[in-house]
Image (cartoon, rainbow, N blue to C red):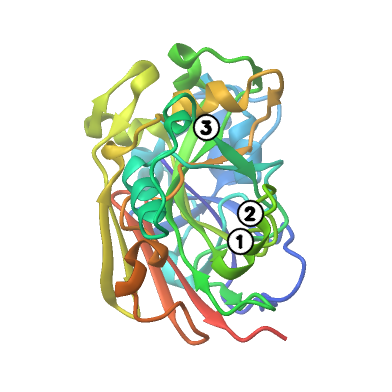
Amino acid sequence: MKLVTFTDNAVYIDPHAMRRDTGTGGVLHNRRVYKLSAVAQWAQRTGQLELENVPTSVLDFVNLDATARQSLAGLCEHLEEAGLASVGIEEVRLRAPIELPPSVRDFYAFEQHVKTARANRGLGMIPEWYDFPVFYFSNHRAIYGPEDEIPYPQKSKALDFELEMACVIGRAGRDIPPEEASNFIAGYCVMNDWSARDLQMEEMKLNMGPVKGKDFATSLGPWLLTPDELEDKHTAGGANERYDLTMTARLNGKEISRGNFKDIYFSFPQMIERASLNTWLAPGDILGSGTVGTGCLLEFGNKRERYLQPGDVMEMEIERLGVLRNTVIESK
């Protein structure tokens, strides 16, 4: 099941405004968008599902119990015969699937990225990196969606992208064992962790951060894909869950990055175990995987021609999760 948040094509989204919930929850099937509430009401009316509250947003959907989510996902193949109203995907503007998540944690879980980025700065690998997956908190009020314009961060001259996969928590939990953690995932989407490298390097010298180097923009989308859609891409399950999914990035139409999610060192269940240690995770919380190997300009080191500039178009693509495209613009 592909869950989307959408508005009318004519709705103007100010790239400099505080990010807010602006869209309607929908189901994308065969390039047609159906209102999520209409799908849920149809399922109730025909006796295929019982719901206490009809979901109207993607965040409502992930707050449903797993059985209800799975039941709704299983009905997608019958949407066309249900006769529900729908619009073509080209007739709407897709937003981030969850525009205002409760929290955003971003991990650092691909070994190739960590090794290469450190080697380019003349640094060796940190032995403790292998002990547990580490993360930082990003800004849940700086979420951008597909086709959104990304204002260039002020006081920076080194804007970078980071090609990542994100999971969305679908069930509250604390101190979650990794063997059970996959049951807490409601879905997956593409993530671009925009990074101001010069600001990031300045603040990390002080052993705090990344903070201002990261908190100005995170892109998510174009849809949230439920786990059942990836069953045939499993390469490992349980605590070591992996998917064989090609990940690519294109700058102004030219491919500059290619990797695969199956190469991740720490799995999402392991990240969930760490994130939930001594604290609660809530439905809608976002966990980013960290950058796939080759998935940012920082890794190019001295071979890098330049960092991103206003006018550049970045496309992040993950197999089955779609293309997340954004254009960089001048900041006010």
Amino acid bearing label 1:
Gln
Amino acid bearing label 2:
Met
Q: Which residue is mark 3?
A: 43
Residue 55 visible (yes or no):
no
Could you say which quadrant of the image residue 135 lies in? Answer: top right
Q: Which residue is mark 1?
A: 200
The residue shown at (65%, 49%) is 138
Labels 1 & 2 near each other (Cβ < 8 A): yes
Give the mark toward the camera: 1 or 2: 2
Labels 2 & 3 near each other (Cβ < 8 A): no
Q: CA distance from mark 1 to mark 3?
A: 48 Å
Could you say which quadrant of the image residue 109 lies in? Answer: top left
Q: Which residue is mark 2?
A: 204
* Label 2 or label 3, whichever comes before in sequence order: 3
The residue shown at (49%, 84%) is 309
* Label 1 or label 3, whichever comes before in sequence order: 3
Q: Above or below — where is 209 with respect to 40?
A: below
User: Residue 213 got which mark?
Assistant: none
Give the mark toward the camera: 1 or 3: 1
- What secondary structure is found at the residue carrying circle 3? helix
Q: Nearer the viewer, residue 66 or 306?
A: 306
- What secondary structure is found at the residue carrying circle 1? helix
Q: Nearer the viewer, residue 165 or 24?
A: 165
Q: Above or below — where is 97 with respect to 156?
A: above
- The x and y percentages for residue 287 are 55, 39
In the shown orientation, is residue 58 left or right of residue 71? right
In the shown orientation, is residue 292 left or right of residue 40? left
- The x and y percentages for residue 108 are 47, 42
Residue 270 visible (yes or no):
yes
Could you say which quadrant of the image residue 36 lies in? Answer: top right
- Rendered-image quadrant of the N terminus: top left
